[in-house]
Each structure stands twice: as structure tokens, then as C-alpha cells.
Image (cartoon, helix red, strand yellow):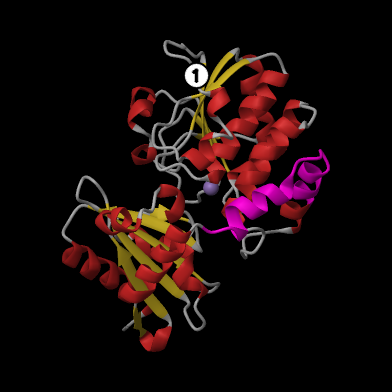
Amino acid sequence: MGVEITINDCAARLSAANKILILTHSHPDGDTIGSSAGLCAALRSLGKTAYVIKNSEITPKLAEYVDKYFAPDGFVPDFVCSVDVAADSMLTPEERVYAGKIDLCIDHHGTNSLTAAEQHIEPHSPACCEIIFLLTKALGVTLTPEIALPLYLGTVTDTGCFLYSSVTARTHEVAAELIATGIDFYEINRRFVETKRRAQLRLESLVMDSAQFLRGGEVAIGKYTLKQLDEIGATDDDTQGIASMLRSIEGVRLSILMRDSKDGSWRVSMRSLPGLDCSKIVERIGGGGHVAAAGATLRMSYDEAYDAVLAAVRAEIGEL
Ligand SMILES: [Mn+2]
């Protein structure tokens, strides 16, 4: 964890830098990608040399919002800034060379533990993109559609299209300013919220079939595997948002979704309704995140991981 600094200090650090590299997190989502592309566009509008490090785990659907900013081979930055990266373990393989050498960490995860010289963490911001928007103001940047579109993307994807309890009046004010630049906001809403691929619906059906409902239906736990993804022709794009699906079932207050990884570990994604803090539950099994959305990675068999997860839930909320 770095020294906490203000958003104005963040702007001062970036203003003093010339060759800036922006880092995104492993299994990138709309928020880390939107934050990186928006910040990169903003810095370039100030005449800086700024790039986003190539994230080889990115999905094609998200890549188009950031790939023009990817750093060329051999780029040597004088300042390294991470966006939406909550822990050293969330750095991608290509970012590992910067582990311990990050100058500034900008994030909205209250559990942030990333090693950085300085940091600006706003746990009450529903999306990192909202912080980047405030940073563009502090930098004196004039908002353009090129900056606004990725920032809107991340705001929509991290708030479930302004649905979640983390949304504030400020979130809507930020969105209003982003939309006022003339961006095609409906295209984002449609592509990332309204439209679903058939494989995505098949995946939802698989997860629903796997689900167990505990504590009178208040707790739902489901799973899917990489093998199943392969069988139904689903890609990583189709898994975005799947963790929230079980929480959307009437009566469910806490949802848990487990999926395997290539290295044999199990990824646990937890979602909750107000009144239940899933970051506290996953901290018991080495994870982190937000009050309403958190996760952990367990290097053990499925049965062991399942037992560990339910033990952590029991320890927080009582018998299941
Ligand atoms: Mn985020």
C-alpha cells in the first residue's frame, strides 16, 4: 500500500511526468479498460506520451476501446500508474516487471493492497472511471468524446447500468457530463447490458441448473467450468456479469459463483444485497473487493474450496 494522496496531488504527479504507462488488471473488465483508455486519452490531450500496457487477457469486445493506446515494444516509462488494480496478484504476467515499481495506484477497492509508492483510493466511488473523470478535471483537461466514451463504458459496466446501490448522485452527474460530449451512450448500454449472446444465455442456464439454495433461499451457490464454457462455445466475453445473475433471483441476498482456472485453482465471485458485506466474507479466504461484490482465488480441489467458502459464509452470517 502506498501513501494516500489527494486527487489534486495525483494530477500534479501526472503533470510532472512525461512518459506515462498505465496498468490494468488481470481478467480485465470494462472499468479497468475504460479507466486506462480515458486516462490515456486525457494525458495525450495534454501533450504527454502516454500508453496502456498491452493486456493479453483482454476480450475482443473490450479490446476495441483500448487497443489503439497499447504501448509499443520497448517503451520505457518515467511514470507508472495503475487503474482499478486492487492487489499485486491482479497484475497480468506482462505487468509483473513493474511489481513494486508502480508510482501511483488509482482505485476504488476498499481492500486495496497493491504495492505502489503513492495511491488514491476512493472506496465509495462505484467505478474507477468516476475517479478518472474527477482526475481529468484536476488535470484541467477538456472533456472530448474520445475521453468520455471509455469512461462511460466503465461506469456502466461497474454499476450494472446505474442499477447498484453504490451509485450516487455524483455518478449520475458524471454520466450527464460524459453524455453531453455527444458519445453514443446507447451503443454502450445495448452492447454491455441489454444484448446477450446465445452462449451467454446458455451459460446462465448452466449456472442456474448447478445452483443450490441455502438458508431458505437467501444464499445461492453455483458453478461452471472451463470445459463447460468450451462445450457451449462461450468466451470470456460471455462470462462478464454472470456473477451477478444468481443475486438477481428473488429472495437471494448473497450469491456465490465458482469457476475453475487453467492452473487448477477455483475463482470465487460473491455478490450481495445491502446489509451483507461480501468483502468481509472473502477476506476470510484470502480475497478482497467491495461490500456488494468481492472475490477470491482458492488453490485447492472443488470440494475443499466449496467447504472453505461455506465456512467463511457461516462465520459471517451464521448457520446455513
Ligand atoms: Mn472497478
Q: What's drawn in magenta, residue-wise?
A: 173-196
> Which quadrant would the N terminus be assigned to in this image?
top left
Tell me if residue 65 can be seen.
Answer: yes
Residue 122: image x %, image y %?
59, 46
Q: Where 314 falls versus 135 (above or below)?
A: below
Q: Is residue 278 left or right of residue 122?
A: left
Q: Residue at x 65, y 28 (%)?
A: 9
Q: Residue at x 24, y 68 (%)?
A: 306
- Where residue 190 appears, x then y in whole percent? 65, 54
Q: Nearer the viewer, residue 152 or 18?
A: 152
Q: Nearer the viewer, residue 48 or 180?
A: 180
**Residue nearest the observer in this picture, 131 or 121:** 131
**Left or right: 20 as drawn, with respect to 206:** right
Is residue 40 rendered to the left or right of residue 268?
Answer: right
Residue 195 in magenta? yes
The quarter of the image holding the C terminus is bottom left
Horizontal relation, residue 39 to residue 264: left or right: right
Look at the image and say whether residue 61 sits in the magenta stretch. no
Residue behind mark 1:
71
Amino acid marked by disc 1: Ala
Image coords of residue 141 (percent x, y): 76, 26
* Residue that extends furthest to the bottom in the rendered view of this protein: 216
Asked which secondary structure carries label 1, the reply is loop
Disc 1 crowd rating (10 Å Cα; few below 14, some 14-19, many 20+) is some
Counting labels gives 1
When the figure is inspected, residue 230 is found, relative to residue 253, above or below; the finding is above
Residue at figure coordinates x 56%, y 44% from the top left: 31
| Residue 316 appears in view | no
Q: Main secondary structure of the magenta part?
A: helix
When asked about the image quadrant of residue 312, the answer is bottom left
